[in-house]
Amino acid sequence: MPNAFLTGATGFIGYHVGQQLLKAGWSIRALRRSTSSHPFLKDLEVEWCVGDLRNYDQVSKAMNNCEAVFHVAADYRLWARNPSEIYESNVIGTVNVFQAAIKHHVDRVVYTSSVGALGLNKDGSPADETIPVSLKDMVGHYKRSKYLAEREAERFLKMGLPIVMVHPSTPVGPGDHKPTPTGKILVDFLNGRMPAYLNTGLNLIDVRDVAAGHLLAFQAGRVGEKYILGNRNLTLAELFRDLQGISGIKAPAIRLPYTPVLCIAYLCRAASDLIGAEPLIPLEGVRMARHYMFFDASKAVRELGLPQTPLEKALRDAVTWFVENGYVKDKSLSLHQIPASWPLDTAGEKDGRDLTPCDAFSPEQRG
């Protein structure tokens, strides 16, 4: 098996990519900052190299003698005191990885982009990799940085670097230790801090399927192509009903109107800029919620064989992990209360909808 250079191994997706590669018999050299930490670092039997994506020399030195590159690392924040940090990591850092990959003549680069850098259908139907998109469509610094990084990937493709791009949707599952913004929604729900919600739509996938998709992209992906790594489309209200079925915690019944929440988010943003602290309600998160982020992952399923693990397993495993690792304050929520299995599509069966992977939306939700 090739020697792999892996970035982002201390993150949610990157850790699982590392696990996937190790199970397949790969050897891994992983880059991490001196300040990076992960509760399962000892679980990854990799060669760690301390360095920073923003430092080309450190990246190039760590990549020496590696045949494959999995560039998973990204600065994923909805708010930053200094937004330039997001661009430095996600754009400049990506350029450094690509430049080093050319220098070392790697066999293939699997670059982890994001569905956030892709276009959306105006009618709300699931979007694929071909929907036109421009920088003005990007909401927030994270999405803009990932969009710009993709343009750099296209530039390096023209230079002859063999890049395959993967676009994870919203991964869920065990090991979300920071947690991610989506993981924080799950934790807040389990801790009873979700009395109301601003409804939106998103595509969820088991994080372990995302990791498998990276290895499949290296093995079977076509150079220059993009692959959405997703599974099931659902609204936030449907997600809460699914979580209720897992945990027994009642789903919030109050749906907030968009405009007042947006106004409050602007006020929170102004206050956070003054005091230099993260806003209680992230403005970029509210602006993103205005459009349903529904996606069609059929290309990755068809060409790569992307696994489509039932979402109830990913959610159940995520809830179990959060409970076992102390993220849930209510000690009465014990693991035996979480069913071993339950009907994923209970809500869909009640109203007659077929919640199939990549297409779980109703006509009225499209507008």
Image: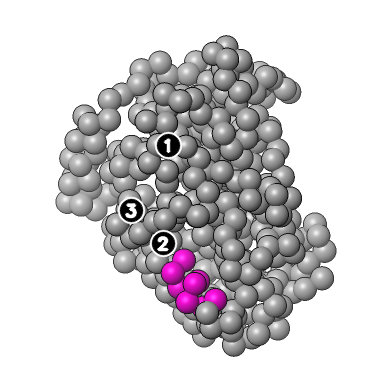
Was residue 276 drawn as part of the magenta stretch in this picture?
Answer: no
Q: How crowded is mark 1: few (under 14 residues within 10 Å), some or many (20 or more)?
A: many
Type of amino acid at the residue the image marks with label 2 = Tyr
Residue 105: x percent and y percent?
65, 85
The reply, left or right, for residue 351 in relation to residue 79 is right
Residue 352 image offset from top left, x and y in percent: 57, 15
Q: In which quarter of the image is residue 72?
A: bottom right
Q: Name the residue under label 1.
A: 124
Pointer 2 or 1: first along the chain: 1
Disc 3 residue type? Asp
Task: Write down the residue under mark 3.
Answer: 137
Residue at the farthest bottom position: 103
- Magenta run includes residue 155: yes
Whether pointer 2 and pointer 1 mark residues with C-beta atoms closer than 8 Å, the reply is no
Task: Please say if 276 is above or below 171.
Answer: below
From the viewer's side, name the closer residue of 99 and 179: 99
Q: What stretch is highlighted in magenta?
A: 150-157
Say which quadrant the C terminus sits in: top left
CA–CA distance in space, label 2 to label 1: 21 Å
Residue 147 image label? 2
Q: How far apart are marks 3 and 2 (CA)?
A: 10 Å
Are dots 1 and 3 in contact, CB under 8 Å?
no
Residue at the (81%, 60%) spot, across then down: 24
Prevailing SS of the magenta stretch = helix
Instruction: Indicate the secondary structure of the residue bearing disc 1.
Output: loop
Q: Is residue 165 above or below residue 109?
A: above
